[in-house]
Image (cartoon, grey):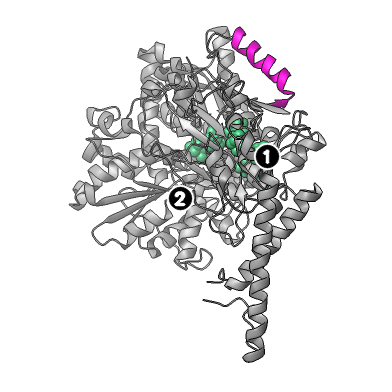
């Protein structure tokens, strides 16, 4: 114990300070008051009421399932407020005093912008490592499209390197029992969502505009701020959860595994997914579809912990039955991708033939412009007006416009919380040049699409067989049970 | 100088607590010493201010309350301190602690009606610790660090009379507020004032008397200089005695045996 001192020294010091104390007191001098020997960032000098651009920080509840903060690293720079307010339209968009909760959609854009690494995802790495070590558990993993074009950055590869097969190899080396592809589930989502959209267009016009629902950040935003539009949301679960539900039903059956012994892990570009997996509305027969979510960054941590280097690991194929994907499923990771994939299959569902070449390379809805518009002419259905929006502050402005005019000129609107879509998600690697990184990742994603043997979700052979063997057809009773969900009005938690 | 806390505007970001720790160089790693049954963390030697969370009935009315020294107009802590280590600064109104003057008796801990001052139990030379109202910043005309870091308008600093006027204006113009400025009269009034839409007793505020505690201690205080002088003399005496013992022993024993070195235990 280095704190120990001799009795003698102690008394000397005490007596010394006694004499000193009396001396200073008698002479009217007080010495220095305690405190004040640290520092604060420059924007907090002065009276504190000068307007500055960046100040303060977002509030993060201890129960937030997506993100957490280490106060010791926080320098009160205000960057998180910029992300939450100006990019995501959350901070400052609800009245004070607070009602039931601190508003957060879990997008993790504050994580991306925090310069000191104070805000991070709530880590599931330990839990996944424990599951891998538990012999009684069958640990299944799936990887989202946007992680395949970003994970390489965590291992020093150039931005936009496609590492899907390396990631599959690394996950097998790490000990996961099966490695499936969320792109497969994206194809499944498209089968359901395109069918639902065509059904709404022709028979349920009150549910038009059709709003996409695969982004949990956007879904929560809609539930908070635009509950009147909840019935316009697609009832489709996100690809992650569709695959989770399929693994714990169809796959468990096929393999003869008790679903309660399956641990479903996903590799996601996203922190909102950590919130999504806990949503009660997604449960089937009282069972959660998914158990743990690792962000792209967390996977890098896990692999490095296990000594696996993505640069040298052997490539592997995704496991069969839930592993095949088409170009359509792969572009989900970029803004506009879901729409393009859905239109390809909607065209097929309406006409019985595959879409023409221009719809397979649909430029108007690609790229980083905040709101993109396009018209798809589908024989038998007519012209479909489409909008694609990313960044929730942009969504707010678009939806306020719709509210003001009372109607939407679009029949289909895609919303992604993060700027650029999931390639710019809150769980992605941090980069020197975030704008450039997003561009490169988007390019890589579309390259995967054009390089794919099949470009449309309905051409996926494993999708066709899973409908034959299990779900029947899109929107069937079984599909509704496992692949669709409901939403919760969260307006009251923020507003009177 | 005073601070007005509008509880309805606080979002619980705890930027204020971080600003306080940074500016006063407090230890971020120190585990909370006191956690209440409701999960709220209490002040301690590394937490001069804390944000406590309260939920109303039906989980409505989520409120966060900033807690720190209220900087009483007639501070009981200062009057309990016979060595004048806590003094009310006339210019700023801050109730300031001077560690050089402190003899470690901890009377202030007992005297404070709000149990604010805490003790550095883990330090070799323990000090009392409590919010200093950033006295050095305030005497330069700056706002306290916590106030400066608050972006929602929950914390406002300024002249006490003006803030009191403002507090009553806010209460009168918005029927949701409780008609009570906490700190206006409590134990004789304080520099930190609170307004709220939820009754203060539901937010962990103590219902204290309006009579200053100091009115009971005035007579005792007059004896302070004499007491302090005796105390200092007493300690000096012990030190001198020790020094002699030390010297004598060193003459007999091995001169290299130096007891003054700290020993690793
Ligand atoms: S995760 Fe998104 S919504 Fe939540 S605080 Fe961060 S930026 Fe705001
Ligand atoms: S961005 Fe990070 S460092 Fe800056 S205020 Fe927010 S949490 Fe603190
Ligand atoms: S855009 Fe993608 S990464 Fe961002 S919140 Fe939505 S699903 Fe997650
Ligand atoms: S609140 Fe307590 S510590 Fe602060 S000035 Fe008043 S008596 Fe002293
Ligand atoms: S006034 Fe200064 S010392 Fe007191 S709580 Fe605020 S920052 Fe901390
Ligand atoms: S900085 Fe302001 S809003 Fe944030 S917790 Fe402190 S008082 Fe509340």
Residue B158 is covered by the magenta coloring:
yes
Of residues A489 and A408, the one nearer the viewer is A489
Q: Position of residue B218 (x, y in %)?
A: 64, 34
Q: Secondary structure at mark 1?
A: loop
Mark in the foreground, 1 or 2 = 1
Q: Residues within 10 Å of mark 1 (few under 14, many from 20)?
A: few
- Residue indicated by mark 1: B222
Q: Residue at x 62, y 50 (%)?
A: B26
Which label sits on residue B110? none
Above or below residue A336? Residue A429 is below
Q: Residues within 10 Å of mark 2 (few under 14, many from 20)?
A: many
- Residue indicated by mark 2: A123
Of all chains, the one bearing label 1 is B
Magenta residues, start to end: B157-173
Of residues A74 and B114, the one nearer the viewer is B114
Taking the image as shown, residue A99 lies to the left or right of residue B222, namely left
Of residues A490 and B129, the one nearer the viewer is B129
**Quarter holding residue B250:** bottom right
Q: Secondary structure at mark 2?
A: loop
Q: Are marks 1 and 2 in contact (CB under 8 Å)?
A: no
**Quarter holding residue A95:** top right
- Mark 1 vs mark 2: same chain? no
Q: Position of residue A385 (x, y in %)?
A: 53, 18
Q: Position of residue A263 (x, y in %)?
A: 30, 51
Residue A114 shows up from this direction? no
Taking the image as shown, residue B179 lies to the left or right of residue A235, namely right
**Quarter holding residue A196:** top left
Above or below residue A33? Residue B257 is below
Give the main secondary structure, helix, strand or loop, of the magenta stretch. Answer: helix
């Amino acid at each position: 114990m280095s704190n120990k001192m001799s009795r003698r020294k102690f008394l000397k010091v005490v007596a010394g300070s006694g004499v000193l104390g009396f001396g200073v007191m008698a002479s009217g001098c007080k010495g220095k008051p305690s405190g004040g020997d640290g520092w604060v960032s420059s924007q907090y000098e002065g009276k504190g009421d000068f307007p500055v651009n960046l100040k303060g920080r977002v509030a993060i509840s201890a129960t937030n399932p997506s993100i957490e903060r280490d106060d010791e690293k926080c320098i009160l720079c205000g960057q998180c407020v910029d992300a939450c307010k100006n990019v995501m339209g959350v901070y400052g968009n609800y009245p004070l005093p607070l009602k039931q909760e601190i508003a957060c959609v879990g997008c993790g854009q504050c994580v991306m912008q925090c310069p000191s690494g104070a805000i991070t995802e709530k880590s599931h790495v330990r839990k996944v490592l424990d599951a891998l070590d538990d012999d009684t558990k069958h640990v299944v993993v799936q990887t989202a499209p946007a992680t395949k074009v970003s994970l390489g950055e965590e291992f020093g590869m150039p931005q936009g390197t496609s590492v899907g097969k390396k990631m599959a190899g690394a996950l097998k080396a790490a000990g996961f029992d099966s490695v499936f592809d969320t792109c497969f589930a994206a194809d499944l989502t498209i089968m359901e969502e395109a069918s639902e959209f065509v059904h709404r267009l022709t028979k349920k016009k009150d549910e038009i505009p059709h709003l996409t629902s695969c982004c949990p950040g956007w879904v929560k935003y809609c539930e908070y701020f635009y509950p009147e539009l909840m019935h316009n949301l697609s009832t489709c679960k996100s690809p992650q959860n569709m695959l989770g539900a399929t693994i714990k039903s169809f796959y468990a059956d096929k393999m003869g595994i008790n679903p309660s012994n399956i641990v479903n892990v996903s590799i996601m570009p996203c922190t909102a997914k950590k919130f999504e997996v806990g949503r009660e509305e997604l449960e089937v027969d009282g069972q959660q579809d998914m158990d743990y979510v690792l962000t792209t960054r967390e996977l890098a941590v896990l692999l490095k912990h296990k000594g696996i280097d993505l640069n040298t690991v052997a490539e592997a194929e995704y496991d069969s039955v839930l592993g095949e994907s088409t170009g359509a499923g792969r572009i989900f990771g970029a803004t506009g991708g879901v729409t393009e994939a859905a239109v390809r299959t909607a065209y097929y569902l309406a006409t019985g033939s595959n879409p023409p070449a221009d719809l397979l390379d649909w430029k108007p809805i690609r790229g980083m412009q905040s709101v993109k518009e396009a018209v798809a002419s589908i024989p038998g259905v007519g012209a479909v007006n489409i909008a694609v929006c990313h960044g929730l502050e942009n969504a707010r402005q678009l939806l306020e416009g719709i509210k003001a005019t009372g109607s939407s000129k679009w029949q289909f609107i895609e919303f992604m919380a993060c700027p650029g879509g999931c390639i710019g998600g809150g769980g992605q690697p941090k980069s020197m040049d975030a704008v450039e990184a997003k561009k490169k990742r988007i390019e890589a994603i579309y390259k995967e699409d054009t390089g794919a043997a099949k470009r449309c979700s309905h051409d996926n052979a494993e999708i066709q067989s899973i409908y034959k063997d299990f779900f029947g057809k899109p929107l069937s009773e079984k599909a509704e049970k496992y692949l669709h969900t409901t939403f919760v009005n969260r307006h009251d938690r923020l507003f009177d | 100088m005073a601070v007005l806390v509008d509880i309805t505007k606080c979002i619980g970001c705890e930027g204020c607590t971080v600003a306080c720790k940074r500016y006063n160089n407090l230890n971020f790693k120190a585990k909370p010493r006191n956690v209440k049954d409701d999960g709220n963390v209490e002040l301690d030697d590394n937490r001069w201010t804390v944000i406590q969370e309260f939920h109303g009935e039906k989980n409505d009315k989520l409120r966060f309350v900033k807690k720190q020294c209220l900087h009483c107009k007639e501070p009981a802590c200062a009057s309990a301190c016979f060595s004048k280590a806590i003094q009310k600064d006339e210019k700023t109104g801050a109730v300031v602690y001077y560690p050089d003057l402190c003899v470690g008796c901890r009377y202030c801990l007992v005297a404070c009606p709000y149990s604010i001052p805490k003790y550095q139990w883990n330090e070799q030379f323990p000090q009392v610790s409590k919010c200093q109202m950033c006295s050095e910043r305030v005497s330069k005309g700056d706002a306290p660090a916590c106030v400066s870091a608050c972006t929602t308008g929950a914390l406002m600093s300024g002249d006490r009379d003006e803030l009191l006027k403002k507090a009553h204006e806010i209460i009168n113009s918005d029927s949701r507020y409780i008609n009570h400025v906490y700190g206006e009269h409590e134990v004789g009034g304080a520099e930190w004032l609170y307004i709220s839409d939820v009754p203060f007793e539901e937010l962990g505020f103590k219902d204290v008397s309006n009579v200053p505690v100091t009115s009971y201690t005035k007579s005792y205080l007059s004896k302070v200089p004499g007491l302090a002088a005796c105390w200092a003399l007493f300690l000096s005496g012990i030190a001198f005695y020790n020094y002699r013992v030390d010297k004598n022993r060193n003459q007999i024993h091995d001169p290299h045996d130096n007891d003054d070195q700290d020993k690793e235990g």
